[in-house]
């Protein structure tokens, strides 16, 4: 392509003016000079090159192109939607295309330049005018319907009142009840409205409808109560049931339950009185039982009727009336029982405190004069009190099952676990019986009479058991009669306490029971142990045989007391386990867990038995056994050395003096303990003896010198004695006591070429020796 000349061509005529190349693009029709053609060609060529570069760059970046195309499509869709809305797709006019646009594209409103906002405003105003008329029409229709309903209800009210008055005149009480229910179903605002006041009154009943309905309902209530009472007096069960079913129909459940409560209370009052004299042992118990059984029978028989016609849970009102009647009867029974039994004289005296710690263990003559009330009288009164409390607890449990469980089933449709019942709601349900006078009277009986008399009886019986205590050395282990006597009493007292069915009494007595056992049983045995060696100092006139006999008797007496305490702990555990497994069925379901907790706290008594027995065992060991242990080791190692050569080693191995002497001394030391002690006491005594024996033995060994053969002899002696002691018992534990001695023997038997430091660090032995002791033992070798 030729380039544009830099100067005018000589062939151009002189008449044409000089024109420089145009720097801008010109329209083809406006080009008049060849130079312009060349300039435009150059410009187009340059532009073509630039566009080629730009197109190449765009083609290389396809992602940017695709993204731009995608955005264009989305914008196109939105523009199309807006165009459809504006041009008629949602117009309320069938012949228009949008907000003010007709099908021919012209504006249907005045003003071709009217904006979109003005168009929308006009459409909204039009729709509001149409919608307002529709709403006003709906309101008018609603008022017409309401007026129709009122007219219908007023006619129903007028018809029901007419039917009610006619049924009353005919004594058709079932029809009257249904008519009254129909009239009462009309809305109160309709009954009291002006329209009903102008339409319903008649010459026969000119009063306003509300007043007329109230008067007719009062007539029904009075008639129902009169007829019900008359039927109850005649014992006409059919009419009693008939009128009882009519009260709920006229919304008079409370009046019906009140009348029914009076009826069932009359049934309780009309029951036959208990035969027999008040002085009879079973008179008051039988009277209370008959009363509670009569009430329970009424509840069981009548609850289905009440639930059917009055609804679940309404029986609680009737139960309250029945319990109110029982309050009067129970109060009279309690007052008569207190007067007849003269229990006040039994509560006043206090049991005298006997200090048995210094008395000899021997039986007391049965004719010995007893102080205080006759225990047989107290036992009879306690039995009667427990029976009275148990009867009331059973009745209370029965009532709980009827007014709590059934009500919960009705609310939830299924039985609930007692842990999920809300405490507040349950307490409210049980207030009918928990707050009753009968409950307070029974609780007062147990607190005022049962608790002090039971404690008196227990203390007196334990006191008597101590005085009659006899050792039984023929048994294995050696025990005394106090053990069986006391725990028979505890089982009796605990059974009576639980049979009362009062958790408040259980909480109060549990602490008192523990205190009595600690003071009058464990404490007295502890004092007896202290008194065994008090005032029994050896006399210079005692001959050897008499001294040995006296010491054996003292040791035997002390061991019997220790065995009594140890077996008492086992008996207590067994008694509590049996009690928990066989709780009397007199407590509420929600009380079972607290009752078990109270009984579990009595296990502290077991710990007191064991701690007292352990302290006594340590006292016996320190006084009789420990002083002989040092002499035992001295006797075993008399003339014994571990500086052995081959000849002396063979001689020592053959004679085996240490093992033989130890066995002989040990058998003498523990003679009589294994057969006399309980297994637990002997195990404690054995472990204590071995533990105290090993400590001075270790010190003795650490003060000796050893040859290589002497170390071997020591290891054999230690192993032989450990094996012997382990074979003496079935509970083991002796080998563990010898661990340090065996480690000492192991260190002494190290080879001469073995590095002691290496053995200490890498032998894998769980050392019980300290590093200082280890180094000291290494130095003992020769």
Image (tube, rainbow, N blue to C red):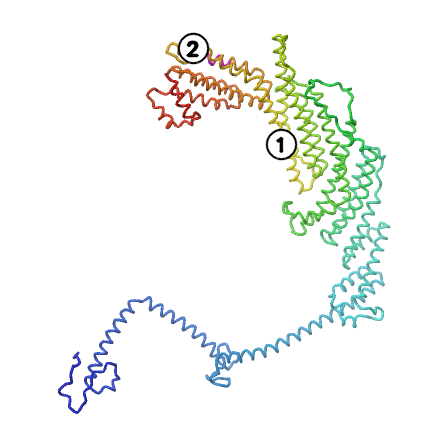
From the viewer's perspective, tell me whether residue 102 is left or right of residue 411: left
CA separation in Å, label 2 and label 1: 55 Å
Q: Is residue 167 above or below residue 650?
A: below
Q: Secondary structure at mark 2?
A: helix
Q: Is residue 621 above or below residue 347?
A: above
Give the residues drawn in magenta, as a range: 651-663
Residue 344, by quadrant, is top right
Give me the disc on residue 654: 2
Q: How many marks?
A: 2
Q: Nearer the viewer, residue 670 or 412?
A: 670
From the viewer's perspective, tell me whether residue 445 is left or right of residue 744: right
The answer to if 238 sits in the magenta stretch is no
Residue 6, by quadrant, is bottom left
The percent coordinates of residue 289 (x first, y second) are 78, 39
What residue is pinned by disc 1? 604
Give the mark toward the camera: 2 or 1.
Answer: 1
Mark 2, residues whose alpha carbon is within 10 Å: few (<14), some, or many (≥20)? few
Q: Earlier in the sequence, mark 2 or mark 1?
A: 1
Q: Could you tell me which residue is drawn at 42 percent across and 21 percent down?
A: 744
Q: Nearer the viewer, residue 591 or 226?
A: 591
The percent coordinates of residue 620 (x first, y second) are 59, 19
Q: Is residue 710 above or below residue 503?
A: above
Q: Nearer the viewer, residue 512 or 724?
A: 512
The percent coordinates of residue 83 (x first, y second) are 45, 77
Q: Quadrant of the C terminus?
A: top left
Give me the disc on residue 562: none
């Amino acid at each position: 392509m030729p380039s544009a000349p830099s100067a005018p061509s000589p062939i151009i005529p002189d008449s044409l003016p000089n024109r420089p190349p145009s720097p801008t693009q010109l329209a083809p029709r406006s080009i008049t000079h060849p130079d312009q053609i060349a300039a435009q060609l150059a410009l187009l060529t340059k532009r073509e090159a630039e566009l080629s570069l730009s197109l190449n760059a765009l083609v290389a970046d396809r992602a940017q192109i695709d993204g731009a195309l995608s955005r264009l499509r989305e914008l196109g869709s939105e523009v199309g939607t807006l165009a459809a809305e504006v041009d008629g797709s949602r117009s309320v006019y069938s012949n228009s295309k949008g907000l003010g646009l007709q099908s021919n594209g012209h504006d249907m409103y005045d003003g071709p330049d009217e904006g979109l906002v003005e168009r929308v405003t006009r459409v909204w105003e039009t729709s509001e005018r149409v919608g307002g008329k529709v709403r006003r029409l709906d309101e008018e229709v609603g008022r017409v319907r309401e007026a129709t309903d009122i007219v219908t209800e007023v006619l129903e009210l007028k018809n029901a009142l007419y039917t009610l008055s006619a049924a009353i005149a005919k004594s058709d009480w079932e029809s009257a009840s249904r008519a009254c229910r129909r009239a009462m179903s009309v809305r109160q605002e309709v009954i009291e409205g002006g329209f009903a006041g102008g339409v319903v009154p008649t010459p026969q009943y000119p009063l306003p409808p509300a007043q007329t309905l109230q008067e007719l309902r009062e007539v029904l209530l009075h008639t129902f109560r009169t007829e019900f009472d008359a039927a109850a007096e005649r014992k006409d069960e059919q009419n009693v049931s008939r009128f009882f079913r009519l009260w709920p129909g006229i919304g008079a459940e409370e009046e019906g339950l009140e009348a029914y409560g009076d009826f069932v209370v009359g049934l309780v009052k009309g029951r036959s009185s208990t035969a027999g004299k008040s002085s009879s042992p079973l008179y008051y118990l039988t009277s209370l039982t008959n009363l509670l059984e009569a009430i329970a029978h009424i509840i069981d028989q009548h609850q289905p009727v009440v639930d059917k016609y009055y609804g679940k849970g309404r029986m609680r009102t009737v139960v309250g009336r029945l319990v109110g009647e029982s309050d009067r009867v129970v109060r009279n029974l309690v007052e008569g029982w207190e007067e007849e039994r003269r229990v006040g004289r039994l509560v006043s005296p206090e049991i005298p405190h006997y200090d048995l710690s210094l008395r000899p263990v021997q039986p007391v003559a049965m004719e010995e004069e007893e102080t205080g009330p006759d225990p047989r009288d107290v036992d009879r009164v306690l039995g009667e009190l427990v029976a009275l409390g148990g009867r009331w607890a059973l009745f209370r449990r029965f009532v709980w099952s009827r007014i709590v469980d059934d009500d919960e089933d009705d609310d939830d449709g299924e039985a609930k676990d007692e842990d999920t019942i809300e405490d507040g709601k349950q307490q409210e349900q049980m207030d009918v019986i928990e707050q009753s006078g009968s409950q307070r009277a029974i609780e007062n009986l147990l607190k005022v009479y049962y608790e002090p008399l039971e404690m008196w009886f227990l203390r007196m019986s334990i006191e008597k058991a101590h005085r009659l205590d006899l050792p039984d050395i023929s048994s294995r282990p050696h025990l005394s009669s106090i053990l069986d006597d006391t725990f028979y009493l505890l089982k009796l007292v605990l059974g009576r306490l639980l049979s009362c069915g009062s958790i408040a009494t259980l909480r109060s007595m549990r602490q008192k029971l523990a205190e009595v056992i600690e003071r009058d049983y464990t404490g007295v045995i502890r004092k007896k142990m202290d008194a065994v060696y008090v005032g029994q100092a050896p006399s210079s006139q005692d001959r050897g045989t008499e001294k040995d006999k006296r010491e054996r008797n003292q040791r035997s007496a002390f061991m019997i007391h220790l065995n009594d305490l140890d077996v008492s702990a086992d008996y207590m555990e067994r008694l509590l386990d049996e009690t928990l497994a066989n709780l009397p069925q007199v407590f509420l379901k929600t009380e079972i867990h607290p009752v078990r907790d109270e009984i579990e706290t009595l296990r502290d008594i077991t710990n007191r038995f064991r701690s007292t027995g352990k302290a006594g065992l340590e006292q016996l060991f320190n006084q009789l056994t420990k002083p002989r242990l040092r002499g035992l080791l001295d006797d075993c190692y008399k003339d014994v050395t571990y500086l052995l050569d081959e000849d002396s080693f063979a001689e020592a191995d053959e004679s085996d003096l240490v093992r033989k002497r130890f066995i002989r001394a040990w058998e003498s030391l523990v003679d009589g303990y294994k057969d006399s002690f309980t297994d637990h006491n002997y195990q404690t005594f054995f472990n204590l003896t071995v533990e105290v024996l090993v400590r001075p033995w270790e010190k003795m060994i650490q003060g000796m010198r050893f040859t290589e053969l002497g170390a071997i002899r020591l290891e054999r002696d230690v192993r032989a004695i450990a094996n012997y002691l382990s074979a003496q018992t079935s509970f083991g534990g002796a080998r563990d006591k010898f661990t340090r001695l065996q480690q000492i023997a192991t260190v002494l038997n190290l080879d001469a070429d073995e590095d002691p430091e290496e053995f200490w660090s890498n032998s894998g032995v769980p050392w019980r020796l300290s590093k200082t002791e280890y180094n000291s033992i290494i130095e003992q070798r020769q």
